[in-house]
Image (cartoon, rainbow, N blue to C red):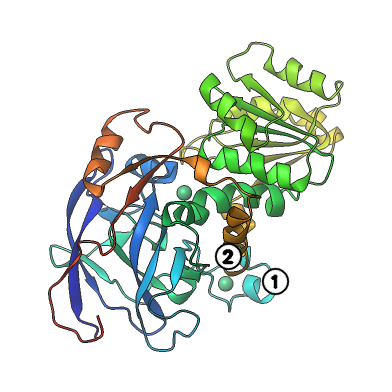
Amino acid sequence: MPSKNRTAPAVVLVEKNRLPIVDEVELENPGPGEVLIDLRASGICHTDLGAVRDARTCPVVLGHEGAGIVSVVGAGVTHVAPGDHVVVNWQPKCGNCRRCQSGRSDLCDQITGTAAPRVFWHGEPIAVLLQAGTFCSAVVVSAAGAVPIRRDLPFDQAALLGCAVATGVGSALFTAKVQPGDTVAVLGVGGVGLNIVQGARLAGASHIIAVDISDERLQFAQPFGATEGFNANLPDLVDRIRNITKGRGLDFVFEVVGSPALMRTAVDMLGRGGELVLVGAAARDAVFAFAPRRFMSNQQVVRGSIYGNIRPALHLPLFADWCIDGRLNVKGLASQSISLEDVPGLFATPGGLRGIRTIIEWPAPHDSQVVASNPQI
Ligand SMILES: [Zn+2]
Ligand SMILES: [Zn+2]
């Protein structure tokens, strides 16, 4: 049984519909096939904010978009060693199920966390959001949850690869498989939406139309590759978008907000054979209704997308390369850096996330406290 070897402050959601708190948790050393990562940065994603509304389990340590340095590896872990820079992959695949074996690991039936709880709160095991729990200066993940990347990418950018970039760029390249010349709209250009915009740019889309309720965000979307921008509240939004395609409608619309009303509007923007990709997380009880007749005769598609259908071990290092060579703009996504203690305050203020991505950063070495002597640490 691994020993509990350190304590660290973490953001804990004690129960739904309450503000999370910052409190000490204890972390165990990793078991066989697991990795302990000292985090250096964690982005705050809308899924973390949404957990207050719809967390499956409470209490839970929030956070899932992180990067840091491997501290300890459990028995049998060979793909990383202490000192390696890694991105947290919150969808570690099992590698053994029917889906993994058939080459569709993005549909893995058994996303694998640690073999046993490694984080404790008041002496009891506590859940971690999405096999991660990155609102804490350290995490223990299964081996596939630690993806090594190059060392010259700053951690505040590396962290964003783990959700916003993976989900956004992946949805354009791997879920939708946007082709050169395709026409695209992105409804909601926050952290994920901007990455869909730049994913569509990388794919060579001819029109990339940003739609948002914030004119400021529309401006922000231009350097990421948006060719047009429209405020979502325009009464003739659908007509304006269809006009861009000479009435034909779009090849792809990405809904990144999770709004059933917006999804319905999105269907009206589609052309023949057009595809609506649902990326935004709607409320668990939300219902999306639309008129099916024209949809049927136009041979259209509605598709769900989670984590951009990426293959994390292959694509997260690739995205890191693209950040360094300038193909991806990730630096421009980070709007402010805060400390862990400031996180509950962000949850308290609706719309309190200024800019695009707020990032928790831990200095090196961070202040997690070693409480049991262990020569390995
Ligand atoms: Zn996320
Ligand atoms: Zn699997």
Question: Callout 2: helix, strand or loop?
Answer: helix
Q: Earlier in the sequence, mark 2 or mark 1?
A: 1
Badge 1: how crowded within 10 Å, few (<14), some, or many (20+)?
few
Question: Is residue 86 in view?
Answer: yes
Q: Which residue is mark 2?
A: 317
Q: Where is residue 271 shown, x and y percent of the image?
A: 82, 31
Q: Nearer the viewer, mark 2 or mark 1?
A: 2
Residue that sits furthest to the top in the current view: 235
252 and 325: which is toward the camera: 325
Name the amino acid type tagged 2.
Pro
Badge 2: how crowded within 10 Å, few (<14), some, or many (20+)?
some
Name the amino acid type tagged 1.
Gly
Question: Callout 1: helix, strand or loop?
Answer: loop
Q: Is residue 126 above or below residue 331?
A: below
Q: Which residue is mark 1?
A: 103
Horizontal relation, residue 329 to residue 340: left or right:
right
Q: If the image is split into quadrants, where does the C terminus sit?
A: bottom left
